[in-house]
Image (cartoon, rainbow, N blue to C red):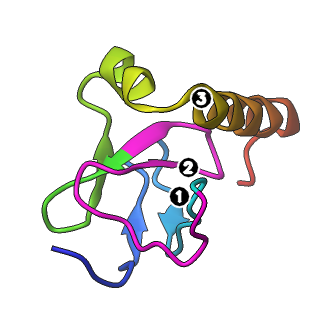
Amino acid sequence: MRGPIYKDRCPKCGYEINAATSIGKDPTHLPDPEDYSICLNCGALLEFDDMLRLQAVRDPERAFDDLTKQQREKVQQAQLHIWLRGRLR
């Protein structure tokens, strides 16, 4: 199943999320079930479920194993930036 991003909330901090950006080669890629995302408010690593709703990552270690080295670095850099910046609200 593939489709638009619906308004959702981060299960960790409640921040409203209504967009996703691919860290892959294709910037127009829409998320698929089990794709990962990051909350821009708290930096939590999230994943899309079968209905493309966000949920906490079930297995964080597996999540990083699924990513390429370059993707892992991008995720870690984004999380670090978010944590250093502080929450938006």
Separation of marks 3 and 2 at Cα, in angstroms: 15 Å
Mark 3, residues whose alpha carbon is within 10 Å: few (<14), some, or many (≥20)?
some
Separation of marks 1 and 2 at Cα, in angstroms: 8 Å
Residue placed most toward the observer, 30 or 42: 30
Residue 12 visible (yes or no): no
Residue bearing the label numbered 2: 39
Residue 50 visible (yes or no): yes
Residue 80's spot in the image, x, y percent? 77, 28
Q: Are marks 1 and 2 in contact (CB under 8 Å)?
A: yes
**Amino acid identity at mark 3:** Arg
Which secondary structure dominates the residues rendered in magenta?
A: loop
Residue bearing the label numbered 1: 15
Mark 1, residues whose alpha carbon is within 10 Å: few (<14), some, or many (≥20)?
some
Q: Which mark is residue 43?
A: none
Mark 3: which secondary structure? helix
Question: Is 30 a magenta residue?
Answer: yes
